[in-house]
Image (cartoon, rainbow, N blue to C red):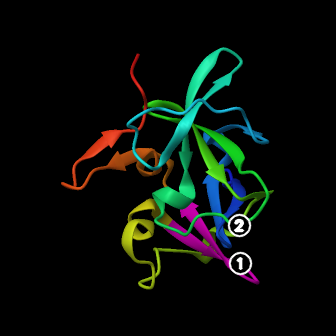
Amino acid sequence: MDQPIQFCTFYVDGLFFGVNVLKVQEVLNEQDMTPVPLASKEVCGLINLRGQIVTAIDLRQRLDLDRNELQEPPMNVVVHTEDGIFSLLVDEIGDVIEPDEATFENPPETLEGVARELVAGVYKLEDRLLLILDTEKAVLIGNSSGANREASISA
């Protein structure tokens, strides 16, 4: 029998997202960040995670959402991708949940813009939708010509 999939959940601008727990290294409170001159608006900076330099990506910016006017600092969801480790800046951390596989659906037609590209699917929960974030696509930063480049900073 297949193992049920568990998701680490978080909120960005009131939207409920999840990433596979196997891709999550850790969840952290606000971290000191070093800005990166001339970086894309989605790249907030670099954090030092026990000697490892990690690129921090603002999911609000990545999803073309409004800036966070709340006083609360962002949380960090540190994820593994094929291109390395990245920190996704989110508004609030949720729980680890294990939704029923039967409730999985393709992304709804109402999703538009960048969100449509970054959401791999949804789970219908009792009181809301769980949007499954494609972490591999979330860490790719596009430019105005439509070509993608990695958000990682090379030394």
Span colored in magenta: 121-133
Q: Is residue 33 magenta?
A: no
> Is disc 1 in contact with disc 2, using a CB cutoff of under 8 Å?
yes
Q: Secondary structure at mark 2?
A: loop
* Residue 142 shows in the view: yes
Q: Pointer 2: residues within 10 angstroms few (<14), some, or many (20+)?
A: some
The residue nearer to you, when weighing 134 against 12, is: 12
Q: Which residue position holds label 2?
A: 99
Residue 117 location (% of width, % of height): 38, 64
Q: Amino acid at mark 1?
A: Leu
Q: Is residue 15 left or right of residue 98?
A: left
Question: Residue 94 — which label?
Answer: none
Q: Amino acid at mark 2?
A: Pro
Q: Quadrant of the C terminus?
A: top left
* Image mark for residue 125: 1
Position of 72 with respect to 18 (left or right) is right
Query: Residue at the front extreme?
Result: 37
Q: Residue furthest left?
A: 145
